[in-house]
Amino acid sequence: MPLNPAIRDWHGRTVWLVGASTGIGRATASLLHARGAHVIVSARSADTLEQFVAEHDGARALPLDVTDRAAVRAAMQAIARDGGLDGMVYCAGHYTAMDPDAIDLDDMVRHVDINYTGALTLLDAVLPHLLGARARKP
């Protein structure tokens, strides 16, 4: 199925990709960059993000731990000061393979903090800005 023309061209759009250091997040950031988006990549690993920025002209690294609510709000405020946001992709995730009888409660709490609460924290910080961007652009 061919791509919808509306999603082929991202020129002039700013997209924040959270969890963009590896895997699907990094691949999505690369694709959006290739389609003309100004990409902001976030993850805990500053070194990996800087490598992405070195390989993608104009990309911006914004190291972030999604479990730190104050840091998430500060990151969104910094993005807003720099021109705003048109989209956000949440690919941050945490998974540890283990036998069911060896489940570590602290690790399970970390799973929930990153995979669920982190996503809600980002959505809470980003949604007002995305709704504003929607009103400004076709």
Image (cartoon, helix red, strand yellow):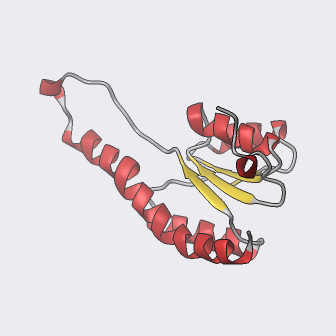
Instruction: Give the residue furthest to the right.
Output: 57
Q: Residue at x 58, y 31 (%)?
A: 23
Residue 120 left/right relative to 85? left
Relative to 128, does residue 16 appear above or below in the rendering? above
Relative to 37, does residue 123 appear above or below in the rendering? below
Residue 101 lies in quadrant: top left
- For the C terminus, the quadrant is bottom right
User: How many numbered discs?
Assistant: 0
Q: Residue at x 20, y 22 (%)?
A: 99
Instruction: Give the residue furthest to the left.
Output: 101
Q: Residue at x 65, y 71 (%)?
A: 134
Residue 98 left/right relative to 138? left
Residue 25 left/right relative to 4? left
Image x and y of residue 52, in percent: 74, 38
Image x and y of residue 26, in percent: 65, 37
Relative to 138, does residue 103 appear above or below in the rendering? above
Image x and y of residue 22, in percent: 60, 33
Image x and y of residue 86, in percent: 68, 64
Q: Residue at x 27, y 48 (%)?
A: 109
Given residues 93 and 67, the one toward you in this image is 93
Relative to 36, does residue 67 appear above or below in the rendering? below
Residue 111 lies in quadrant: top left
